[in-house]
Amino acid sequence: MSKKSTKKRANRAKTKKKKLEMKATPESILPPKLKSEPEAKPEPELIPQPAQLIDLDEKSVAEPLENLERAPKMSLKLHALNVRLPWLKVVALVLLTALVVVGVEEVLRHNTNPPASVQVDSAPGELPAVTEVPTGVELATNTTPAEQPESPNTETPKPEAPATTTENKPSVQPSQGRKLIALTFDDGPSAAQTPRLLQILKEKDVKATFFVLGNMAQKSPGVIRQAEADGHEVESHTMTHANLKRSTVEGIKWEVAAINGVFTEILGHTPSLTRPPYGNVSNEVRTYVNQPLILWTVDPEDWKYKDAAAVRSKVVNGAFDGAIILMHDIYATTVDAVPGIIDELRAAGYEFMTISELAAARGVQLQNGVTYGSFRP
Ligand code: ZN
């Protein structure tokens, strides 16, 4: 091969290279980039940077040659001219470096863009008392409570204020300065005791909550119908008083489905709250019962003492604002204790509420899978 033809080739390669250079000129890349970011402030560094690189190109500043490996095709073509025209390498190298720099910058810009737009979206949500919250923010707020059942806290009875408490503060205010308390009765209905209790509650004008067993409700459907008609809250204590913590997932599902069926048959609706027997809760219980789990904070152990005076003094001594009191309406001694309990607590300034009323009065939005033992102010 003659020197001339080699030179010709070299020139051709050079022209080709220059054409490529024109095509790949940073300016030809910049416009679409700027178009895609209309909100971005013009950044002066963006344009000078590639321009500087072109200056360097003209001055033929040497760069590490191994960078050529990034463009194997070009490298192959230039290989033949390696010895005679080493500066071509430099040109190609500088050009490639410019392209890489622009490319990396592009990637970085795209990566930084999403957070910027998130900040813009979330900004209105930080404004106080905004009713028209952007949809995106609403979704974000909704996901927070949904995550709670999946990552349950301790099993200790604790009122867990939802993230939206601030928004509910107006509804909390009416209960401030009031002493609120909830009487709850488990394991019934009892054909022998519950009607008597309903009569006492009616006379005293007190609303209570009954956590009934499905199999007991089946035996005395009229009793829970009467309880609901009297304004009491009737909720689930499972179908068979199962220890849900030791149950299989299938067992938990069966307990829920069975009592739902009993409620639907007798009351025409399913329960919205569950008191897990023995207060036993597990992640499976939270997930598969999938209702607010109502525990308690005052337990007179009426099943153990079966003594009206003892039950009464234990309840009255343990009472506090927002407490949930646990009793069982299947014991005559417990029902005997109720009139005195109501009189003493009322004299101490307490108002009696159902669980749902108490939660609402304290601005607590009950959440599925979360345990509640009290609703303190
Ligand atoms: Zn029970």
Image: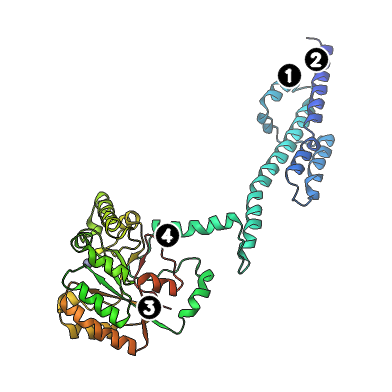
Mark 2: few, some, or many residues within 10 Å (few <14, many ≥20)? some
Image point (46%, 72%), residue name:
363
Mark 4: few, some, or many residues within 10 Å (few <14, many ≥20)? some
Q: Nearer the viewer, mark 3 or mark 2?
A: 3
Front residue of 91/51: it is: 51
Badge 2 or badge 1: first in the primary sequence? 2
How far across and down, in percent of the image, does residue 43 sit? 78, 50
How far across and down, in percent of the image, does residue 260 sit? 29, 55
Per the image, the residue denoted by label 2 is 6
- Quadrant of the rendered image containing residue 268: bottom left
Badge 4 or badge 3: first in the primary sequence? 4
Residue lying at the far bottom of the rendered structure = 347
How far across and down, in percent of the image, does residue 156 sit? 33, 69
Badge 4 or badge 1: first in the primary sequence? 1
Label annotation for residue 148 = 4
Up/down of 171 relative to 136, above or below? below
What amino acid is at disc 1? Ala
Badge 3 or badge 2: first in the primary sequence? 2
Quadrant of ligand 1: it is bottom left
